[in-house]
Structures are given as structure tokens and as C-alpha cells.
Image: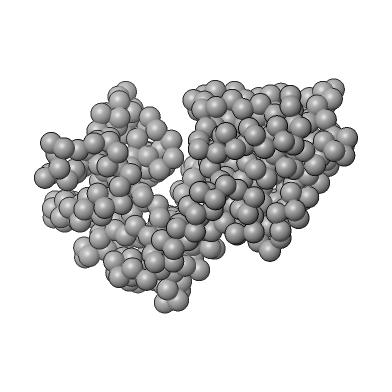
Amino acid sequence: MRILLSAFACSPLWGSEPGVGWRWAVQLARDHDVTVLTHAYFQSHIEWGLAGRETCGLKFAYHRVSWLRKTFKPSYLNSRLYYLVWQIGAYYVARRLDRVTSFDLTHHLTWGSFRFPSFLGLLRVPFVFGPVGGGESAPARLTRSLPMRERLKEAVRDLVRISGSYDPLVWLCLWKAKLVLCRTEETRRCLPAWARRHARIRHEIGAPPLQPTSGPAVARKTLKLLHAGRLVGWKGAHLALRALAKARDRGVTAHLSIAGDGPMRGYLEQLAFELNLGGACTFHGHLQRDAVMDLYADVDAFLFPSLHDSGGTVVLEALSRGVPVICVDLGGPPNFIDQSCGYVIPARKGTEHEVVEGLANAITGLYLSRDLLKELSKGALARAETMSWERQVQRVYDDISEALAAV
């Protein structure tokens, strides 16, 4: 199949959305003729990634907003207005490319938010939108103990999320799509009722190759936990600290490593002090990805009570290292975790106290049973194997083939 993949962000050197764009491009090129339309900023990254790689089925087309060429700043890559202008120009670039290649499919991948539309559906080519997220929301009752600025951020984000459901450009994009792929059920529910009929739940991320650690240290007396992510309110580190404190009050000997930095670090360090965690919690600050991956080798479980992650790359990384995961049933992470590889704590209707209690119970259970910890570690590897990049992309394209056949 001749595919035009729209990936505004695409880089083999970066994680997050740019990394997703790159991984999909490489994976799809194994079975299809793929042209990736991306921002010109990433050209040097991509040329580095292509060096020495067999890529006969993979080509790249670069586009930038021409009238901002001289004043362009990397910070524009995070601007919604700049992104919208880029997408308008990308449509005209795609139209020229289609005249030469006659694509069988156009597929929008990044940015992966339902609130940021693509115009590729205006081409006379079947169009797929997603997987996209952005419809997830943190329950206010789980943020009440956070600083006011974090609660205000969440309130503003909720207003933006709701407005996206009524954006005429979003509606146009959804109307033109043969298939809409949503990362979570929360995002699917944000779509207009008529768009939900051709929307499915699929994920945009995959697990890295399995790299088992030595497994839980049976003889170790301290249960070692890891939390990784930017230190912002909705990542749930405040819940992780409270759960650790509650577990320790029950006699559990546990230590939490926190990898990441952000505006909440000072608040969290003060919270750890107030909870008398002392040497039971270590803030590592910002770490490079390789350093974070090294941390997995020395922990027993990954504690990630994020309140509205639409994906959860760190969750799949933990599973691929054989590290069980404790998360809450919000956003994308619970789609990756089942009883074989961790705990999913109910949080949709619970209070902060109830969620912290559930997290503490999970920590306590792992501490009391190293046999359970070993079984969950094996289950984590098995679960990650079913969610490799190859399988995740193949699931999406099975859906796409089915949708195209029904046209």
C-alpha cells in the first residue's frame, strides 16, 4: 500500500511524539511504500537516523511555514497556532505529492490529539486519523491537595478539552476520516456521537525489545519502587508519596526513587519531608533515557498513579524490563496492565484517601509476598511481548484494512 504518513513531529533522537512518528515510519516501511510528511526542523535528525539503514520503502517530505523561515524558533514546535498554520500548508504539499505518487491512504499520526485537526481528509484519498488522545481528565477530587496553580492548570485544560469537542475544524477532520483511532475510551467519548460510530480504541505506542533484569531481589529486605515522569500535578507523584508513607506506617520497608523534574519538585520534596519519608525517597531530577532505563534494573515495581496520561511509554518500558506496574484506572496505562503484571487501582469515583489506600495496599502486598512479585515480573515480560511496536502497528493496520474493505 502507498501511504502518506503525516507526522509533524518525527525524530529518531527524541522521545514522546517525535519518537512515535519515527517508530511508526520505520515499522510501516517494512511492508508498505511510505512517504512521511514532517516538519523541516527534523530533517537533520532523520538523516542521522537513516544513515546505514535499509529504507527502500521509506521516503520523507519536509515542510515548514515559509513566511516564518527567517524568524523560526524551536519553541514554535509547541505552538498550537503555528501547528495549525503548518497543517494548512501541509495539505497543499500533500496534494502535490499525491499527484506524483497516487497514495492509497493518508494517515495522520502526530500530533496525536483529537483537538488538533489534520486537513488531509480533503484529498480524494481514504483518510485515517489517529491514534489520538487528549480527552482524558483528572478528577478534581484527586487534585485537591495540590497547589492552586496546578489545580488552575487542570481547570484551564478541561475548558480547552471541552471546546475541542465543538471545534468546526475538528468536526471537519472527523467527518472526512474513514476511521478514527482513539487511545482511550475517554477520548472516544469526547467525539461527537456521529464520529464515535467509526472510532476504535487503539494505541500509538509499543513496548521496546524485552530486556529482563535479574528479577526481584528475594533476599532484599527493602521493596524498591520507581516513579518516572515530569513533576507536574497530574502525573500523580503526590499520590505515590502519600501511599509510600501509608505503607511504611504499616511496617513496610520500602524506598521510592523519583526520576524527573518540573515545577512540582519543590512541593513534592516538602511533602516528602512532612510525611517523614527521609531516606525512604530519592529525587534524582532529570535523567537521560538511558539512565532511567538503568534504574529499572534495580527496582521491584513501577509506581505510576498518573491521572490523565493518554499513553504511558514508561509503563511499557517497565513491563519490557520485567518490572510490575501499579497504576490507577485513568487514561492509557490501565489498558496495558492486568492481573498478570501489576495492579490497577480504582480511581474514577474514589476520593484521594481511597486511592492512596489502594496504592498502599498494592505496595504492601508486593512487600509481603516475594513469590507474587516474581510471578508478576514474569507476567510483565509476557505482557510486553504482546505489545511490541510491530504488533501494535499491525493491530491498527488490521483495523484500517477492514475499514477500507467496507467502503
Q: Which of the 4 image quadrants contains residue 134?
A: bottom left
Residue shown at 65%/34% (left/top)?
270
- Horizontally, residue 311 falls left or right of residue 326, namely left
Residue 328, how many percent across, how many down? 66, 51
Q: How many marks?
A: 0
The residue that appears at 39% across and 66% down in the rendered structure is 163
Residue 314 in the image: state x and y as whole percent: 56, 38
* Colour pattern of the rendering: one colour
Q: Is residue 310 left or right of residue 345?
A: left
Residue at x-position 72% and y-position 36% = 274
The residue drawn where x is 41% and y is 38% is: 19
Residue 220, given in percent of the width and then of the height, sits at: 82, 23
Work out which residue is located at the far bottom of the displayed protein and give it.
194
Nearer the observer, 238 or 393: 238
Where residue 363 sits: x, y (%)?
A: 78, 40
Question: On the image, which quarter does residue 320 sit in?
Answer: top right
Tell me, yes or no, if residue 30 can be seen here: no
Viewer can see residue 272: yes
Asked if 358 appears above or below 299 in the picture, the reply is: below
Residue 243 vertical position relative to residue 225 in the rendered view, above or below: below
Can you say which quadrant of the picture contains the C terminus? Answer: bottom left
Closer to the camera in the image, 96 or 397? 96
Whether residue 134 sits left or right of residue 3 in the image: it is right
Q: Is 276 placed above or below 403 here?
A: above
Q: Is residue 279 left or right of residue 173?
A: right
